[in-house]
Image: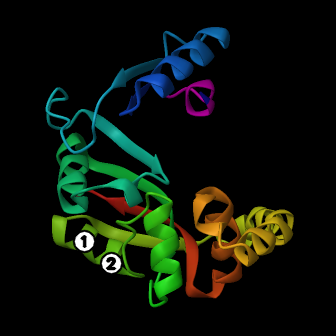
């Protein structure tokens, strides 16, 4: 909706019917139906869009759920016009910690790439001018809030051996405690 309010025409895709319904209602409330179209879909298979459909593609915190990241990037590449830009925001962990790998798995982010892998895959698919901005300092205050608010309840649950049953709490606290093992990035890549 923010992009549409800035004058862009937006095609949104989500794999969860509930989120599609919520998004459609929010778009209608803001009167943006003429600028935003929302459909149910899976970014592993975007064949209903013809080649070169878009000037830009934006995704945020979804790539960790990709079953086949290269296939998704190939779809994005195919869908962009020459000169089109992909912008992708995501946590980028080095995954060297067994605990962090377990937290990522439990929070349904088991496909989180190792640090630097996304840039390499983008180049292999054919993207050029790949730029990576470290946004960690901008995201860290929120992670700190999660870590501080959740720390005491998490430690109590951990004492009783129940901490693994509270996935979001565990993910928030452990991600903050292990923030040095990763960063939050924004990647920009261009289709030549």
Residue 64 vs residue 135, the one in the foreground: 64
Q: How is the image coloured?
A: rainbow
Q: Return the x and y of residue 130 as percentages of the image width and height.
A: 37, 70
* Extreme residue toward the bottom, this view: 96
Q: Residue at x 41, y 31 (%)?
A: 16
In this image, 51 relative to 175: left or right?
Answer: left
Please tell me how crowded label 1 is: few (under 14), some (14-19), or many (20+) other residues with Cα within 10 Å: some
Q: Quadrant of the N terminus?
A: top right
Q: Return the x and y of residue 159 as percentages of the image width and height.
A: 75, 77
Write down the residue under mark 1.
121
Q: Is residue 3 magenta?
A: yes
Q: CA distance from mark 2 to mark 1?
A: 6 Å
Q: Residue at x 38, y 81 (%)?
A: 116
Residue 122 vs residue 177, the one in the foreground: 177
Q: Is residue 51 magenta?
A: no
Q: Residue at x 41, y 21 (%)?
A: 38
Secondary structure, mark 2, is: helix
| Span highlighted in magenta in the image | 2-8
Q: Looking at the image, is 117 positioned above or below residue 141?
A: below
Q: Looking at the image, is 76 positioned above or below residue 160?
A: above
Secondary structure, mark 1, is: helix
Looking at the rendered structure, the number of numbered marks drawn on it comes to: 2
Q: Return the x and y of residue 117 as percentages of the image width and height.
A: 33, 78
Q: Quadrant of the C terminus?
A: bottom left
Q: CB under 8 Å between callouts 2 and 1?
A: yes
Q: Dividing the picture into quarters, in which one does residue 95 lie?
A: bottom left
Q: Looking at the image, is 4 positioned above or below residue 111?
A: above
In this image, 127 relative to 131: left or right?
Answer: left
Q: Return the x and y of residue 134 as percentages of the image width and height.
A: 59, 74
Q: Dividing the picture into quarters, in which one does residue 41 lie?
A: top left
In this image, 29 relative to 109: left or right?
Answer: right
Write down the residue under mark 2.
117
């Amino acid at each position: 909706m923010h992009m549409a309010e800035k004058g862009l025409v937006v095609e949104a895709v989500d794999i969860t019917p509930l989120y599609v319904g919520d998004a459609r209602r929010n778009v209608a409330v803001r009167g943006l139906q003429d600028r935003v179209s929302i459909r149910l879909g899976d970014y592993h298979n975007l064949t209903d869009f013809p080649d070169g459909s878009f000037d830009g593609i934006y995704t945020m915190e979804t790539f960790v759920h990709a079953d086949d990241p290269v296939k998704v990037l190939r779809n994005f590449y195919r869908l962009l016009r020459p000169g089109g830009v992909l912008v992708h925001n995501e946590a980028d962990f080095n995954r060297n910690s067994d605990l962090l790998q377990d937290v990522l798995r439990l929070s349904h982010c088991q496909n989180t790439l190792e640090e630097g892998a996304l840039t390499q895959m983008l180049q292999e698919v054919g993207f050029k001018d790949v730029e990576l901005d470290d946004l960690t300092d901008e995201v860290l205050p929120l992670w700190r809030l999660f870590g501080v608010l959740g720390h005491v309840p998490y430690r109590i649950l951990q004492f009783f051996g129940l901490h693994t049953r509270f996935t979001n709490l565990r993910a928030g606290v452990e991600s903050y405690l292990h923030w040095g093992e990763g960063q939050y990035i924004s990647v920009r890549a261009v289709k030549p």
